[in-house]
Image (cartoon, coloured by chain):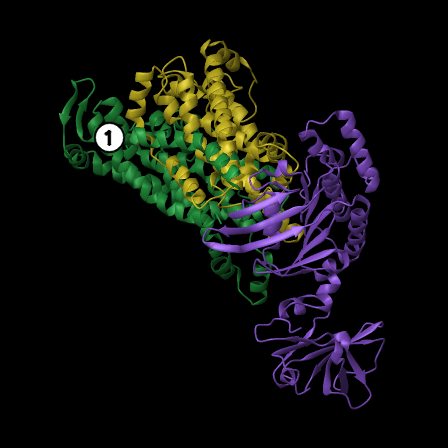
Chain colours: A yellow, B purple, C green
Amino acid sequence: MARSVTPRRKMINTTAAWAVGLLIFFPILWTILTSFKTEAQAIAAPPIFLGFDWTLENYSVVMERSDYGRFLWNSIIIAGGSTILGCIIAVPAAWSMAFVPSRRTKDILLWMLSTKMLPAVGVLYPIYLLFIEMGLLDSRAGLVVVLMLINLPIIVWMLYTYFKEIPVEILEAARMDGATLKEELLYVLTPMAIPGIASTLLLNFILAWNEAFWTLNLTAVNAAPLTAFIASYSSPEGLFFAKLSAASTMAIAPILILGWFSQKQLVRGLTFGAVK
Amino acid sequence: MGQIQLKQVTKSFGDVQVIPPLDLTIEDGEFTVFVGPSGCGKSTLLRLIAGLEDITTGHIEIDGKDATDLVPAKRGLAMVFQSYALYPHMSVRKNIAFPLRMAKMDPAEIDRRVNAAAEVLNLADYIDRRPGQLSGGQRQRVAIGRAIVREPSAFLFDEPLSNLDAALRVGMRMEISELHKKLATTMIYVTHDQVEAMTMADKIVVLQAGVIEQVGSPLELYRAPRNTFVAGFIGSPKMNLITGDEAAKHNATTIGIRPEHIDVVESGGAWTGTVGVAEHLGSDTFFHIHNTGLAEMLTVRAIGDVSLRHGDTIHLNPRTEEMHRFDADGLRIA
Amino acid sequence: MATKASRSAARLMMAPAVILLLGWMLVPLIMTLWFSFRVYLPLRGGDQGWAGFDNYIRFVTSSAFWPSVQTTLIIVLGVLAITVIFGILLALLLDQPMWGQGVVRILVIAPFFVMPTVSALVWKNMFMDPVNGLFAHLWRFFGAEPVSWLSDASLPAIVMIVSWQWLPFATLILLTAVQSLDSEQLEAAEMDGAPIVKRFWFIVLPHLSRAITIVILIQTIFLLAIFAEIFVTTGGAFGTRTLSYLIFQRVLESQNVGLGSAGGVYAIILANIVAIFLMRIVGKNLD
C-alpha cells in the first residue's frame, strides 16, 4: 500500500525507520566493533564507540586456537550435508505432491508439518540412547541425519509451494515430447525451479547452522559445531569481550550474508506458504 | 499414418463419470475438431487420446494398434497446449529440439529438422531467444514447431488460439489450416469456438456432457443438425428455436430457423414484431425482435444496412423450406 | 495429469520422505511413552520395572513443576506480546515510503540470523554484565545503580533476549501481510472520513489478523522449546527454568529418564494442542 507522500513526511519516515533499524541492529554492530578492540578498550568506561585502535589481534587469537577451524568445518559439514541430503529426498516427494495430487496429499503434507512440531526435549533421551546404540553420538553423520529430519518437512513444504507455481502443462509437454520421468525432473522441472530450490537450500542451511538443541546435546568434541564452540564461552572466557566478539562475528557473518540474500523467501518458508 | 479409434471409451474421476461409453473413429489425414461448451469433456477426451489421463474402460487404437496402456511418449502424437507450455529456460531452438533430443536423435539431424521447422513457421528471426521474450503469436508458432519436428502420426491441439487476440486468431487459424494442407497429417483440434470449428474442420465432433451429439462435416451440421443442442450450438448468430403453437403448426415440438433464413419484408409476412436492439455492421444487420406473438425472442440477419431502428415495427417472412423440425426429445424430424 | 504410471511413480518418490519422517516420529515417541511408565535411572541401576502413572504424578506434583509452568507462560506470553505489538508497529513503519527501505529491512531482519548461543552470550556479557556491560554504563551515566540482570531480573532479561531474536520474524511476516493490503480500501475509508486510528482498527488490523495468528502459533511452538538462550545464560537458575528445561534437567542432569519422559509426554501434548490450530490455518490455505 505504498502511496506518494510529501518529501517532509518521507524524511520523517526515513529518520524514524533508520533509528529503529539501527537500534535493533545495534547489538550486532556493537559485537562487530568490539571484535576489533583490545580487551582493555572493550571494557573501557565510558564505552568507546569508534575511536579505538583497530586491531585484528582477537581474530588471530581465536583462529590460532586450533579448535576453531574444526568447529567451523563441522558446522559447514553438518548444515550443508543435512540440507543437501534433505533436498535429495524432498525434491521427488514435493514433485509427487505438487503434480500428482491425490486425496491424501493434503493430509500427508500437514502430517509432515506436524512432525516438525514435536518438542525436541520430549524425545531427547530416546534419540540419545539410539545414538549411543548406533555409535552415532558425537559424530557428524549422526547430526547430519537428525538435522535433515528436523528440516525435511520445511524443505518439502517450501519446494511444494514453489513447484505448485510451475504450470503442469509444461511437464505434460515434456511427457508428450518423449521425456522419461527422470528426464522430466532433470531437464524441465529442476531448471525451472532453480530459484525456489536455491532459496530452500539457503534457508535450511541457515536453520541447520543455527540449530542449538541437538548440536549441543548430541556432540562432545569431535562433531561439535560453532553453536557448541560459542557456548563454551559461557564462562569464564565470556568476560574477554573482544575475543568473544571476534568468535561471535566469525560464527554469524557467513549466515548474516546468506540470510540477507534469502530474506524474501524467508516469510514463505517459515509460514509454510500461508503468508506470501 | 494416423488413424485413431476410440472403442467404448469411458472416463470417471472418482465416482463421477465424465465420459460415458463413447465410440469414435478419426481417419488418417483428417482435420477433426472437438467442439462444445466449456466442461463438455472435449479437453478430457483429447488428454485421453494423448495418454495424459488413463481411460477408465475401453480401448484406444492408433493405426490399428492398441495404445490404451502406452505412455504418452510412445504414442507418436504431438500436442500443442493452450498455454503453449514452452520450456521457459530454453531458447526457441532448444525448445523445438527437445523432443528430438529425448529421442536420442543424431545432432546433425536435429539441426536439420529444427532449421526446416523454423523455415516453415518463419521462426528464424527469434530462434535464439527465450519464450519470455516472444509475443503470443510467436510463442504459438514455437509450440507448433516443437510439435511438427517430431513428424508425429497425429497432432493434438488443445484450444491453441484462446490466448491470442482476435486479429491474430484469424491469422493463426489460417496458418494452421495451411499447415494441415501441407503436412496432410491427422489433426485433432479442441475448441469452444464454433467459428473455428466451422472454418477449419473436415469433421466436427459436437460434445455435450461427455456425450457425442453429432459427428459430421461443417455443412452437414449446419444443414441438418441432429438435435436442438447442435442446432443451437452451430451457426452464428444462433438459430431461433421456437416452441409452442407456432411449432405445432408444423407438426413439431420445436422448430428452428436460422437468422439468415428469415426475410425482412415491407408488409405482410408471417410474423410482425418490434425491433429491440439493432446491430448495424454495414455488411449485415442483426435485429433482435420482441412482440411477435411467439414465446421466444427472434434474431434476424438482413444483408446490407437495413434502416430500421429501435422501436420500429418489422415484418418477417421465414423461409419454410429452411426450417428445421424437432420432436419432444429434441431430435430432428426428417 | 494422473495416469496409473505417474501415480505409482509418485507413491514411490514420496516413500523415502514419508518413511523417514514416520520413523523419526514414531520410534522416539514410542520409546518416550515406554520410558514414561518405567522406573528408569541409567546411573542408578537402569530400568527397574513398571511405574504405572507414578512418573506422571510425580512430575506434576514436584515442587519444580508449577514454577516451571509459570516461567514458561511468562516467557512465551511476554515474548509474544512484545513481538506482535512491536512487529505491527514496525511493519507499518517500514511500509511507509522512505529512503533506503531495503537497507532498513536488512538491519531489522539481521537478529533472526544470529545463532541463539551467540545472541544469548552477547546479551549476557556485553550488555547485561553488571560491571562492564553497556547497560551498566548506561545506568551509571544516569546515576543509577547497575542491575544484575540475569540474577535479579532474570525473567525480563530472557524475555528481552528472546524478543530481540523473534521480533524480525514477526515484523517480516506482518510486513508481507501489510504490503498485500489493497491501498484502495484505505483510500475509500479515508474518503469516508475515517480518522487514522479507526482506519487502523477497522481495516488494517482485520487484514493482519491471519498473519498475526500465524505469527503467534509458529512462535509459540518455537518458544515452548527455547533452550540455548537459557542453557548459556542462567542454566535454569534464578527462576528461569522452563518446562522444557526442567525436562532436560530431569533426563540429562539428574538422569531420571522415566520422570523426564513423563514430562516429555506432557510437552508433546501441549505442543500438539498448539499445532492443531496452526494446521487448521495452514490447511485452509492449501487449496
Q: Residue at x 71, y 41 (%)?
A: B153
Chain identifier of the residue bearing label 1 in the image: C
The percent coordinates of residue C268 (x first, y second) are 30, 37
C260 or C79, which is in the foreground?
C260
User: Relative to residue B295, is residue A195 depicted above or below?
Assistant: above
Q: Residue at x 41, y 30 (%)?
A: A150
**Nearer-the-camera pick, A96 or A53:** A96
Q: Where is residue A247 in the image (x, y as percent from the top left)?
A: 48, 19
Q: Is residue A106 above or below residue A142?
A: below
In the image, what residue type sits under mark 1?
Ser
- How many marks on residues? 1
Q: Picture quarter containing residue A264?
A: top right
Q: Position of residue B111 (x, y in %)?
A: 79, 29
> To which residue does mark 1 refer?
C261
Residue A106: which quarter of the image?
top left
Instruction: Confirm whether residue B320 shows in the render.
Output: yes
Question: Is B63 drawn above or below residue B203 in the view shown?
Answer: above
